[in-house]
Each structure stands twice: as C-alpha cells, then as structure tokens.
Amino acid sequence: MSLVEQFGPHLPFLRRYARALTGSQESGDSYIRASLTALAEDPSQVSDELPARQALYRFFHVIWGSTGARLERPGGAMTPETRLQALAPIERQAFLLTALEGFQVSEAATILGKTVQQVEELIAKAHTDIEDTLSTKVLIIEDEPVIAADLESLVEELGHEVTGNATTHTEAVAMARANPPGLILCDIQLADNSSGIEAAHEILEELDVPIIFITAFPERLLTGERPEPTYLIPKPFQENTVKAAIGQALFFHPSSESVAAE
C-alpha cells in the first residue's frame, strides 16, 4: 500500500489538529509539510504496528517535539506563543487528541509516549486551564433551535455570555454590529439558505474576532487549497470538542482580552 493510500484519508484531520495546536492555518500547515517531507524521505520512521491514523499522529508528534517545542519561548509581550508556553503544550495535546480528534486515552498515550495515567492527569489539568480562560461575549449563528440551545448552555457553563442566536446571514451581521462579540460559533448552512461562511467574512471585515465553524462535513473545508477556517467542529458535536475549540480560539486570539464580558 502506498503512503497516499495509507495516510491520505487521515491528512485533513491531522491538518485540523495541527492548526488547533499551533493556533493558525499557516503554522499548522507548515508542520504538516515538515512531517510529510520527513515521511517521504524515510517511510520506515512510521510504525507499521499501529493503525494508520494513530501511527501518523505519533509521527507528527515526533516532528512537533523536535521543532515546535523549540519555537516556544517565555517572556516579552503576551502573544499566542508566550501563552502557549504558559499553558504547557503537552496538556493541551492530550486534551485535543481525545476531545477534538476522538482518540481513546490509551491511544493518546501511545501517540504522546506517555502512560495512560499521565495522559488522564494531563487532560484534567487542561480542563482546569480552559475553564480559567477569560470570559467573553459569544454570538451563536445556528438555525437549528435544539443545537443552538445546546451551544448556549455549554457556552454559559464555561462562564461566557451569549449575546444572541442568529439564524440568517443578515441577522448575524446585524447582531455582531449591535453587540460586538469576542467569539463566534457559526453554522455553515443557515435558515434562508444563506451562507454562514459569507456572514463570517462580512463580520471579519469590521471585527477582529475568532470564529469556530460547525459543519457535518469538515473535510470539505480542509483541502489545503485555499484560506480555510482554523477551527472546525463536526456535527453531531461532542461537548468536550466544543470546549476544546473555544479554549484554543480564545487562547490564541490576541484580542480576546479586549472583548471580555462586562
């Protein structure tokens, strides 16, 4: 089996993970390219004793550990990089692997080269760190009432304030202008067949705000062929997935402190 056949189906999701880990499409994709280059040069570096997806993520972490870790430096202005150092990347790696990528704790332990107990402790610490994230105002753009209600409940449970729930493009832009949010949770297909992506782009022309997109087909937006969302949540979503994405989005966005809930 060729490398493309073996690992190709898992690359969109590894790309999603790398972007969430680093906080940007550009940075995440650069680590993906480094991993793929190293893999092409020496395919034997990937374990053939593990399932393909697990082996690919484990190999990515070898690359990340030998390059990304050295890029993290404390001190200076409070940038995403210094925040990353402050929150201990290994804790968020364990949390993202289980909450965002759906690996079992035992699988995450293998990927990270840790014991199951160590990963459980890392995940617990990550939960605490995420809960300590600055509270902010959240605009929900979702046309399904049940999903919107679930998101509102979860957002408020995390200590954030929901400013409203828009169901159309026009409504979303109007709500964002009237009460600027610090975070947006955005569906892609809205009630009047308008596009949540277009609404998000219009909002971003006026506001600097992190946006988490929600879709039943995340792989369609993770081709690497155009500018793409950093944060995607697949439907049906898990609560921990939403928590992980919210924590990452607020953590990495430099202006999140300026739109804190009053």
Image (spheres, rainbow, N blue to C red):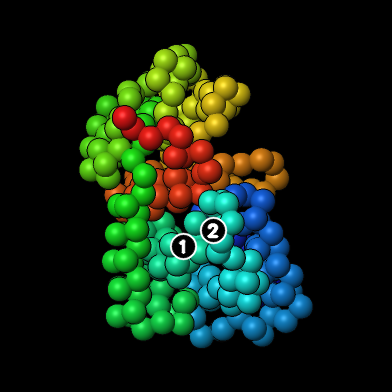
- The residue at 40%/78% (across/down) is 109
Task: Name the amino acid type tagged 1.
Answer: Ala
Q: Is any atom of residue 20 visible in this view?
A: yes
Of all residues, the one furthest to the right in this rendering is 41
Task: Name the amino acid type tagged 2.
Answer: Thr
Badge 2 marks a residue whose secondary structure is helix
Of all residues, the one furthest to the front in this rendering is 76
Estimate the x, y position of residue 119 in percent, counting from the top left.
35, 75
Near-viewer residue (180 or 104): 180
Looking at the image, residue 28 sits to the left or right of residue 195; the answer is right
Q: Is residue 227 above or below residue 114?
A: above
Q: Is residue 251 above or below residue 127?
A: above
CA distance for labels 1 and 2: 6 Å
Estimate the x, y position of residue 97 in percent, counting from the top left.
43, 64
Classify residue 115 by image quadrant.
Answer: bottom left
Mark 1 crowdedness (10 Å alpha carbons): few <14, some 14-19, many ≥20: some
- The residue at 58%/75% (across/down) is 65
Near-viewer residue (221 or 38): 38
In this figure, what is the number of numbered marks?
Answer: 2
Badge 1 marks a residue whose secondary structure is helix
Q: Are marks 1 and 2 in contact (CB under 8 Å)?
A: yes
User: Which quarter of the image is occupied by the N terminus?
Assistant: bottom right
Near-viewer residue (2 or 21): 21
Q: Is residue 165 above or below residue 157?
A: above
Residue at which label 2 appears: 82
Estimate the x, y position of residue 240 in percent, counting from the top left.
32, 53
Mark 2 crowdedness (10 Å alpha carbons): few <14, some 14-19, many ≥20: some
- The residue at 63%/77% (across/down) is 66
Residue at which label 1 appears: 86
Estimate the x, y position of residue 158 in percent, counting from the top left.
27, 45
